[in-house]
Image (tube, rainbow, N blue to C red):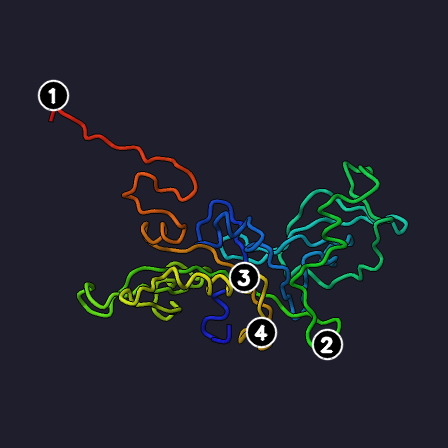
Amino acid sequence: MANPRQCKSISALPDRTPGASKGLITGEKWTNHPLFQLLPQTTVNAKNFWIGDVVNLYGYDQKFLVKSFFSFGKEGTAFVDGYFILENNNNYGVAPDLHMFPQQNMICTVDKDIFNPNNCCTLGLGIVESPSLSDEHARLLFGQSSLKIEKHGKPGEYLKVAIAPIFFFTDDTSGGTSKQHIQYESWSMTYAALPLEDRGRRENTMFIGCAPKSDGVNAMHFIPGLSADMKALEAGVVMFSSEHNELVLVKASLMFISADNPTHSDICGLMQQATLYFCRICYFMKANKKKASNSFGK
């Protein structure tokens, strides 16, 4: 995050463009899983907006309840989606239809003190469907993201948030050109938001560590330490961002671990593929494949 060359490219909004394939940001996990898709905060014209904020939009008199932030279209335009709020005699009804607008249409936030469970409801087809809010509308209006953390010594001001998913790579490597001697098992890390053509570059690959096989230590010995770090990063870690020129809360969830089949078996605690009973939990036996015989029985 402190590297000005990489800071802007290691965090990206989920892309919801239909039929698009722009990398991992258009994948189902990035767009649907809560650890990746719910960037709780964005900045528009030097103003911070959060999921659950009620905002005013250009060209509309109704208030707008923010649900999520994402990118859309060939140019990757930043959008916001949410629900219109209709007002009548200091009573408020949240429309059930979801609408999306470019984030630049957001003008400012509305003080939410005017809303309470007694004067809000979810609307149906032009009439009050129920005397209370739906679970989603209630969560957006009256809940608060766990990532909304006040700045130290500045009440009412909150840290900006960056979602920067990562993935690991682990495999055998060698300290010699023959790859038969001085063998090591290593771990490295790459930023998942980078385009495919940039993810494989050496400058974008972060070396974590390695262990020589001869010492009886392998890649699996790294997992306890990596797990502790990943739990902290999933919860959010405060660090300096060169893009924002201030401290921000960074949430970096692990997207996947890239490895070959034998290494994946080790990570999952499975026996190697050559064994008949390869599952560490049950006694499922791998089916034996018989060689096809020809008309002469060979």
Label 1: how many Cα within 10 Å (few below 14, some 14–19, many 20+): few
| Circle nearer the N terminus (3, 4) | 3
Q: CA distance from mark 2 to mark 3?
A: 27 Å
| Circle nearer the N terminus (3, 1) | 3
Q: Nearer the viewer, mark 2 or mark 1?
A: 1
| Circle nearer the N terminus (2, 1) | 2
| Circle nearer the N terminus (4, 2) | 2
- Depicted 131 relative to depicted 16: above or below: above
Nearer the observer, 209 or 255 = 209
Inspect the image, locate mark 1, and give the three-letter code of the amino acid beneath it: Ser
Determine which of the numbered discs, if any, sits on residue 154 in the image. Answer: 2
Inspect the image, locate mark 4, and give the three-letter code of the amino acid beneath it: His
- Disc 2 vs disc 3: Cβ atoms closer than 8 Å? no
| Circle nearer the N terminus (4, 1) | 4
Nearer the observer, 2 or 152 = 152
Q: CA distance from mark 3 to mark 1?
A: 60 Å
Q: Under tag 4, what secondary structure?
A: loop
**In the image, residue 194 lies at what x, y percent?**
43, 62
Q: CA distance from mark 4 to mark 2?
A: 17 Å
Q: CA distance from mark 3 to mark 4?
A: 25 Å
Taking the image as shown, residue 58 lies to the left or right of residue 211, namely right
Taking the image as shown, residue 256 lies to the left or right of residue 120, namely left
Q: How many marks?
A: 4
User: What residue is shown at x 72% (from left), y 42% (from top)?
Assistant: 96
**In the image, residue 65 lies at what x, y percent?**
72, 53
Residue at label 1? 295
